[in-house]
Image (cartoon, coloured by chain):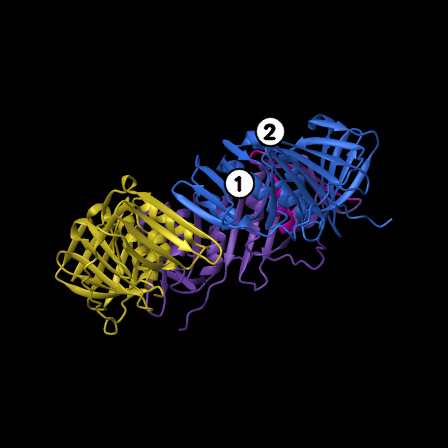
Chain colours: A purple, B blue, C yellow
Amino acid sequence: MFQSTIKTETLKEIVDITATLVAETKFNISKEGIELRTVDLAHVAMIDLNISSAAFISFKSKGVELGVNLDKLKDVLRLAKSGDEIQMKHDEEKNKLVVRVANITRRMALVDTAGMSDPKVPSLDLPAKVTLKTSDLARGIQAAVGVSDHVAFIARTDGFDIVAEGDTDTVSLNLEKEKLEDLICKEKVRSMFPIEYLARIVKEVKSEHVTLTLGSDFPVKLEFDIAHGNGHVVYLLAPRIENA
Amino acid sequence: MFQSTIKTETLKEIVDITATLVAETKFNISKEGIELRTVDLAHVAMIDLNISSAAFISFKSKGVELGVNLDKLKDVLRLAKSGDEIQMKHDEEKNKLVVRVANITRRMALVDTAGMSDPKVPSLDLPAKVTLKTSDLARGIQAAVGVSDHVAFIARTDGFDIVAEGDTDTVSLNLEKEKLEDLICKEKVRSMFPIEYLARIVKEVKSEHVTLTLGSDFPVKLEFDIAHGNGHVVYLLAPRIENA
Amino acid sequence: MFQSTIKTETLKEIVDITATLVAETKFNISKEGIELRTVDLAHVAMIDLNISSAAFISFKSKGVELGVNLDKLKDVLRLAKSGDEIQMKHDEEKNKLVVRVANITRRMALVDTAGMSDPKVPSLDLPAKVTLKTSDLARGIQAAVGVSDHVAFIARTDGFDIVAEGDTDTVSLNLEKEKLEDLICKEKVRSMFPIEYLARIVKEVKSEHVTLTLGSDFPVKLEFDIAHGNGHVVYLLAPRIENA
């Protein structure tokens, strides 16, 4: 059983973030809220998104798993005008997701969740942690586009750098400690990541700050709040190991 | 003889509506105004557009038929700035349409009207009539895109529905009587129409309300005012007959 | 040696104008400022752009020639927010152009200038001179698109016309003397030019007025200020000789 009402902008946040990796996903719905755990086809990135029932205008569930096509939800979101609320309800009898906005009702076929894996969030012990403005991260990544396909995140004891090195050009964003919201770094660490993935996710981050947890040649954990703090996203991205 | 001055926005309304069906059309110009009667190549839809001389800033004609290329008029409309007036004049000697906007004069070759038919508006006795907000109609049609290629218009004694049924999903816009501007319906009627045609025309309707006249498996008559009430459009669309 | 700080909008003006003809160009940098002299591959148009050191926030050079890829400068310009300043510096040791905006540093490989010609600005004795609003020139050129590939500039003793003649249609912009900022013309002259070149350059002109110097079947000199008068551009365009 699942029945809820949510602001258009909150549902849009959830859908847009998840759609950077997949077109279909499993909504794990409990009494307390919804969790989406998603890995992209190439197994390069994982999203672990949690949203509390407090992010909803109304929320009722005894727990259910629903396989949802995100493109169909985007169709409905496009119909919503600013201020519209969206109702979502599981029609158990016909096994459809019934979505309502204004006078419109869309009855969506659910996706079979049997084939969907339940990815486990790996436990990582990453030594460095950087909290920076989302706009700074976005600019550093945008600057790297066209210079290289990969970008290095470098945490220093006194700052944080995003560096891309191409055949002829290099580009770097350098943020000294005072430009950062927070920095925990005992010794310099460096890992490289695909720009394409970073560019897609950073575009969807609406919170003012992002926290990166980093090691050397380790995955990065990119964390940020959604739904004005009533939800949280952990985005894990595999490193590209540089030639030794 | 034909000589006139018109507001850019009024000419744009006429051209944009007619261009949803054809690239060239015949302007039937009389003393009282202009009538355009147009059928698309596939003979699925017809437009009967009438605009009174009162919609013009100045208007003089003894009656003439001019074959006009709408893309060329669009070129001229793109040159106009907000507030610009457009002059149109028939140069009888050279058989050109002379169009002026600001300091620019475009002399257009006319299209031979010999090959252009004079479609007759069929007389239809349609039992139901619904007047609704153009924005509601537009949302109902937009909601159906991607679900199906066709949409059913259903008039009920107590409301009006737009329904699209796809292989896996359905979507409906339901408007109860109090959400409608007007409703005349003694018994439920239902007809199906191609979404593509509806989406194209509804985008060009500038009036706040649209009136639909409907039967069961009959064409729909979609009517609306143009030029702030100094003109009127009847858009006729053939139904898709559902399998019995 | 070259080291400078410039407003984003000023650098953008220089790059956008020059990029209408070429993707790479030579910056001739002296103590007094920068000159770019550029001919397109087809040798149809030439730009002679001069910008004084006064257009910069700071400017230091002993004179140097730098081959610059304009697409890379555009990449950096896209990173700048309104109000950002851009620093450019020649790293002589590594022969790179170091460009800084906000916290971002891009180190660009320079282009070999050995293969770049130093086009000479031909000395032309053109009898007519017209100064008009850039917006009028832009409208006249836009009006001609779709009618013909070429446009005639006609200076009269009492005005200036832009005329395009197609197979079926003609279009003209007619500006009488009082609509012009300035007119020097003792007898009528007429030359034809490719619309594509004119459309590309006129889009980048930010100054309110443009001066055209014209003859009959001669190149046109299109001149305008940049950087609020601290720079000047001469754009030379070859005529299309009409059949006698």
The residue singled out by tag 2 in the image is: B229
Amino acid marked by disc 2: Gly
Asked which quadrant contains residue C132, the reply is top left
* Residue name at image x 20 percent, y 68 percent: C93
CA gap, disc 2 to disc 1? 15 Å
Residue C225 in sight here:
no
Is residue A200 a member of the stretch shown in magenta? no
Residue B56: % across, % down: 52, 32
* Residue name at image x 44 percent, y 49 percent: A211
Q: Identify the mark nearer the N-term, 2 or 1.
A: 1
Vertical side of B141 occupied by C147: above or below: below
The residue singled out by tag 1 in the image is: B12
Asked which quadrant contains residue A214, the reply is bottom left
Closest to the observer, C206 or C196: C196
Q: Residues within 10 Å of mark 2 (few under 14, many from 20)?
A: few
Q: Is residue A46 left or right of residue C233?
A: right
Residue A20: % across, % down: 54, 54
- Magenta segment range? A69-92
| CB under 8 Å between discs 2 and 1 | no
Q: Is residue A138 left or right of residue C183?
A: right
Is residue A86 a member of the stretch shown in magenta? yes
Amino acid marked by disc 1: Lys
